[in-house]
Image: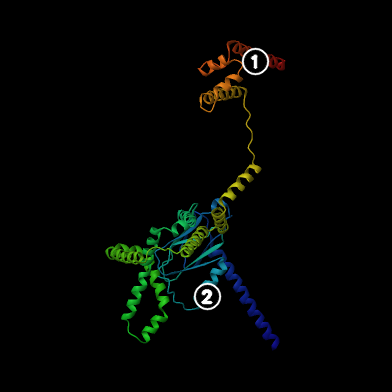
Amino acid sequence: MEHKVVQLFSVIICLLVCNFFYSESAFATDSIHFLKPEDVFENDKAGLQIFCHNANTKYLIHIWRSLTMHLNTNIDNYDLYDGKTPQEVVQMHDDNQRSWRFNLFGTKKSNKLKINPFEDICIGVYIYPSNTHKYTMSMTQTRVDILKLMLTVLGAMIYWNARRLSRNPLFYYLCGIMLGITTSIIILVYFTSKLLPRGKIMYLMVATGWTMSFYILQALWENAHLIAVQYREIVTWYILGTSFISFVVCYRFGPVTNARTKKLIEWFLQIGGLIAIYYSSYFREASFFCCIVMILLYNFPIVLIQKGRSYWKNMFPERRKLLTEDQYRKEGIRETNKALDELKGYCSSPECNPWKTVLRLKDPIRFAKFMEGESHLSDDESREHDAEITRIIEECEYTDDEDDF
């Protein structure tokens, strides 16, 4: 009897294992799709479909590259899951199906999913059987993401100008006005809480205050454009009013004068700039290297530039360019005329003692003619120079003829 029970239990185990592997293999072949840039996949089936992307090789020129998955559908009731592998997405889907969950923060699902091009990632789309199943999933690649590039430039500018900004009164007033606008919601919540009745309802709202605040902020952010268009007059007057109050408060206390406070503001700005540079790219190693280079250039600029120049000259020395015969002759004439003009200028200047100069000359009359604009060579010297040049040219031509034979 015990032997039969053990056999029956073994058969059940085997059937379950076979069913599991069969379902896994069927799922892997039918519902997993690997997408590449510019690919478009159309689906008309209900259930879970997984779209994956394999990691790209990291190159420095791809520092601002980004990928986007576009889900084109008219269905509102669907679930999204993301993970590193298809198994992780399936596990998340199974956990969600087994338990009842209320997604408090899911006010709106985004149809554009930004993904890291340098990591393996999978996106799961679950369509309920009661809905229309047709939708398309596509992938686009942005070689240079303008937003990420602007974030890098903004972070570098903030880091490099942190000291100047921390001592600028205009920056102080702008930050004060922005802080006043963004924190005015806290004042509204405070006065609203004064109107609520005391008791259990008040305690419940206090207990869920942070959750509700995050929910409201997310809903406002997602519908900011709609609110600004429909209630533009109210939004305009609200911004103007809070800006004026913030300016009055900042003007009352005045800009920061304490040196240590300015230093703290400078450090916070620099930290914020480095964080912006680090998160401006999916290529974290390259963005971290940019942060290190920024810190070194800011703190040791002259030493690094000199070291870099010397290292470059040692590794890549300049090659000397040899002059041709014609270039050599032209260079000699140009430098000779330049030296003669400098000599004339010096002899005509007050620094030159003409009497001492005349005593050192062999032919003062010839020098005087040179200073008055005549040639520095005599007629005999010019004829000798021309004859020497002619002789050299003839010798060169004679040598070339012998080489040809």
Residue occupying the point 58% across, 48% down? 305
Mark 2 surroundings within 10 Å by alpha-carbon count, few (fewer than 14), some (14 through 19), many (20 or more): few
Cα–Cα gap, marks 1 and 2: 96 Å
Please say if 143 is above or below 199. Answer: above
Report the residue at 66% width, 15% height from top: 392
Q: Which residue is rendered at x = 62% and y = 31% of the image? A: 321
Give residue 343's position: percent from left, percent from top. Answer: 55, 24
Residue type at the position of mark 2: Asp
Q: Nearer the viewer, residue 216 or 328?
A: 328
SS at circle 2:
helix
- Work out which residue is located at the far left of the displayed protein and give it: 233
> What percent of the width, then of the height, locates residue 144?
49, 52
| Quadrant, the C terminus | top right
Report whether residue 54 is seen: no
Horizontal arrangement in the rendering, residue 202 relative to residue 9 (left or right):
left
Mark 1 or 2: in front is 1
Tell me which numbered mark, 1 or 2, is placed earlier along the sequence: 2
Residue underneath mark 1: 393
Residue identifier under label 2: 95
